[in-house]
Image (tube, coloured by chain):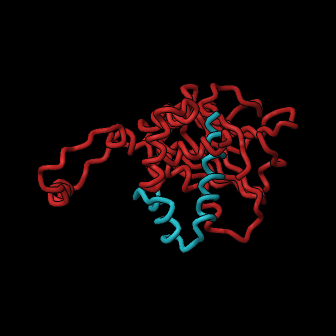
Chain colours: A cyan, B red
């Protein structure tokens, strides 16, 4: 959560979480699409 | 570019996740890409009402001196824009919380069963007020984004109804201002699109076993 609130970009988030960039991007992608569906 | 790609790109841009290079590219594309512009407006419009949810907070006294110290020397004119709006960043904070709850479920227990559900409960103004997190084994966490006031002699009752169920099942009375955890045993079979709702009922709960009062918040579960 701090990563988002602190305004990190994908790259910074991946470093912060020690996860591959592609993995972080796919987590965020899934979360955003789920959020869009929830807000529909 | 698929519709999903555009949705994600626009959300990342609105949330400030895009790298400086991506952001510059998006800003160039916005001029000529109507669909992208619509996606950006969608996220701005949908996220804006959430700015009313958090309580206002006063910045610490140390903040202004710190900002002043970090300012560039005069000469470079300020570049005002919507991304400098306080409302936007309040929104980002609330949305980030919602995303973090969704992502947190994955980060904290990556080895557990992959099928989880999330529901965002909205009021009739389409403002999100509660988040329901459902684990694959059925445990439910009901998380308020802001306190829901409950009048005297009344209570908030939490309900669920799967698409295949004929009637809602009560998950019990819940406080309006705290996280409630509901054990797996209370939850009937979980399916995608299962409805969750909070209704206002008499102090001891609905006398009929069905919702009798107004629906304050409602949302349906999506797999994450």
User: Where is B51 relative to B134, above or below?
Assistant: above
Quadrant position of the N terminus of chain B in the picture: top right
**Which residue reaches farthest bottom?**
A18
Please tell me which residue is depicted at 54% across the width and 33% down the height of the picture.
B33
Please tell me which residue is depicted at 42% across the width and 54% down the height of the picture.
B20
**Residue in front for this viewpoint, B42 or B79:** B79
Residue B126 drawn at (x, y percent):
56, 29
Question: In this rendering, would B74 be left or right of B188?
Answer: left
Question: In this rendering, would B40 be left or right of B117?
Answer: left
Please tell me which residue is depicted at 64% across the width and 28% down the height of the picture.
B215
**Residue in front for this viewpoint, B124 or A38:** A38
| Residue B146 visible somewhere in the drawing | yes
Question: In this rendering, would B155 be left or right of B158?
Answer: left
Residue B30 drawn at (x, y percent):
48, 36
User: Where is B40 relative to B9, above or below?
Assistant: above
**Which residue reaches farthest left?**
B74
User: Where is B24 relative to A4, above or below?
Assistant: above
User: Where is A22 relative to A33, above or below?
Assistant: below
Residue B205 drawn at (x, y percent):
67, 36
Residue B139 drawn at (x, y percent):
72, 57
| Residue B152 visible somewhere in the drawing | no
Please tell me which residue is depicted at 74% across the width and 49% down the height of the picture.
B223
**Residue in front for this viewpoint, B119 or B201:** B119
């Amino acid at each position: 959560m701090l990563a988002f609130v602190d305004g990190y970009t994908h790259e910074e988030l991946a470093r912060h979480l020690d996860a591959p960039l592609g993995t972080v991007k796919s987590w965020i992608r899934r979360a955003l699409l789920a959020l869009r569906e929830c807000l529909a | 570019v698929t519709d999903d790609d555009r949705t994600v790109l626009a959300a990342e841009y609105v949330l400030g996740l895009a790298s400086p290079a991506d952001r510059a590219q998006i800003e160039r594309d916005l001029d000529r890409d109507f669909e992208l512009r619509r996606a950006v407006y969608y996220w701005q419009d949908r996220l804006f009402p959430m700015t009313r949810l958090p309580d206002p907070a006063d910045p610490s006294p140390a903040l202004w001196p710190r900002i002043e110290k970090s300012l560039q020397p005069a000469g470079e004119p300020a570049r005002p824009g919507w991304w400098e709006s306080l409302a936007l960043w309040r929104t980002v904070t609330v949305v980030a919380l919602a995303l973090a709850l969704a992502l947190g479920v994955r980060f904290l227990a990556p080895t557990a069963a992959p099928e989880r559900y999330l529901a965002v409960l909205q009021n009739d103004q389409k403002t999100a007020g509660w988040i329901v997190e459902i684990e694959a084994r059925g445990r439910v966490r009901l998380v308020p984004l802001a306190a829901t006031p409950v009048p005297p002699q009344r209570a908030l009752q939490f309900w669920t109804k799967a698409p295949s169920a004929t009637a809602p099942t009560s998950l019990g009375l819940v406080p309006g201002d705290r996280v409630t955890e509901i054990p797996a045993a209370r939850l009937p079979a979980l399916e995608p699109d299962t409805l969750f709702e909070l209704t206002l009922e008499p102090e001891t709960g609905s006398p009929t076993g069905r919702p009798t009062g107004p629906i304050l918040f409602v949302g349906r579960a999506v797999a994450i």
